[in-house]
Image (cartoon, grey):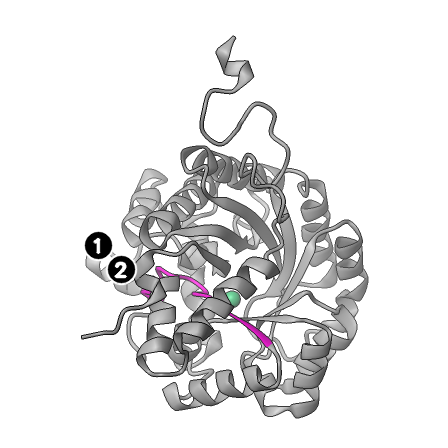
Amino acid sequence: MTKASILDERPELTELHSHVGGAVDAAIMWSIAHQQGIRLPTKDYWEFVELISVSHPDKVNNLAEYDLIFRWTELIQSSPLAIERSVYEIIGGAYRKSNVTTLELRFNPMKRNREGEQDLDHIIAAALRGQDRALLEYPQVRSGLILMMDRTFPLELNAIIVEKALRFRNRGVIGIDIAGPPNPVFSYREHQGLVERAREAGLGVTIHTGEEGRIEDMWEVVEHLRPDRVGHGILSAYDERLMAVVAERGIVLEVCPTSNLRTHAVRDLEELRHILTTLRSHGVAVTINTDGPQMLGTNVVKEYRLLLEHGIFGEQDVRESIATAQRASFLPQTMSENGFPYALAGVSRGGVDADNAL
Ligand SMILES: [Zn+2]
């Protein structure tokens, strides 16, 4: 029998690292695909579930193969209607399943516009509408969107994504990210100006790096992009100097245990234990996330339970990590009045507001 845990008390949880492409329930993805008449490679629902999930450790060999699965989910989510429903369903689902009350969702709008056939502003506005609808339904939840640049895009395309993030920053976009398949010729440094603009405008900056591959990439990110948070960053556990810099600058790592195990970025639970223990003993702030709960068959509660069950985290570590995630969120800490990541007149938590009473 498992021991009593803070997790049994249904604590309010924070998820900082979740991709829209990996977070929508398979049944809903199936429904969206059919609603839009998308030709899928199978007419069998269970084969489809297999297609869009990384259910066992042998499914993918590395990060590049993992990214290939996103092609399907991104295609299905490539319309205003589809992205609206996706975002809407993720927020409600995370709250109902795991009591996630602070949620940051990330996606690349340019991988949702069918190579320019769909208008980018419509895609982003629809995602925000999905978020608004979910927040009206669950006023206990706070949520914001992070727009992702891509490591396979030229600078000009990534510049457009930052422009969009700036345009929608007062409507529920709270940050930017760089993600996507590994690309040996990609330069993080070249994106310094773009990241700077976003930061000056008050957007949060998180960057995918230090997941697998070269530790030099993470150095480049830390030195030149100066992110608030790093997506993964686990490789730094093997570099004392880098850990010292990360800790000193207060950069928070978004660690995704199951994801790292499934993509083989981390060999096994023993290596995961080594990484998390090392990071924490060097004062690096660590948060625990899913990366994509549906694709990886997980949720934030399961991630914490995995660490507890294997003695990698104790109860106090779980509490600390929950608090760190809450603190590291890009959502304003003081916006709890209406739950929206921007001022929305007339909407309040509970009760009848003045406008409606007229
Ligand atoms: Zn990620």
What is the secondary structure assignment of the residue under circle 2? helix
Name the residue: 67% across, 80% down: 217
Name the residue: 73% across, 55% down: 159
Please say if 312 is above or below 288.
Answer: below
Name the residue: 57% across, 23% down: 346
How far is the residue under mark 2 from the one under mark 1?
6 Å
Q: Residues within 10 Å of mark 2 (few under 14, many from 20)?
A: some
Q: Residue furthest top?
A: 358
Whether residue 95 sits left or right of residue 157 in the image: it is left
The residue that disc 2 covers is: 49
Asked whether 297 falls inside the magenta stretch, the response is: yes
Please say if 169 is above or below 227.
Answer: above
- Residue 269 visible in the displayed image: yes
The residue that disc 1 covers is: 45
Badge 2 vs badge 1, beta-carbon distance below 8 Å: yes
What is the secondary structure assignment of the residue under circle 1? helix
* Residue 38, x across and y down, in percent: 35, 46
Asked whether 11 falls inside the magenta stretch, the response is: no
Name the residue: 80% across, 60% down: 196
Amino acid under disc 1: Tyr
Q: Which mark is residue 272?
A: none
Residue range highlighted in magenta = 285-298
Residue 278 occupies quadrant: bottom right
Amino acid under disc 2: Val
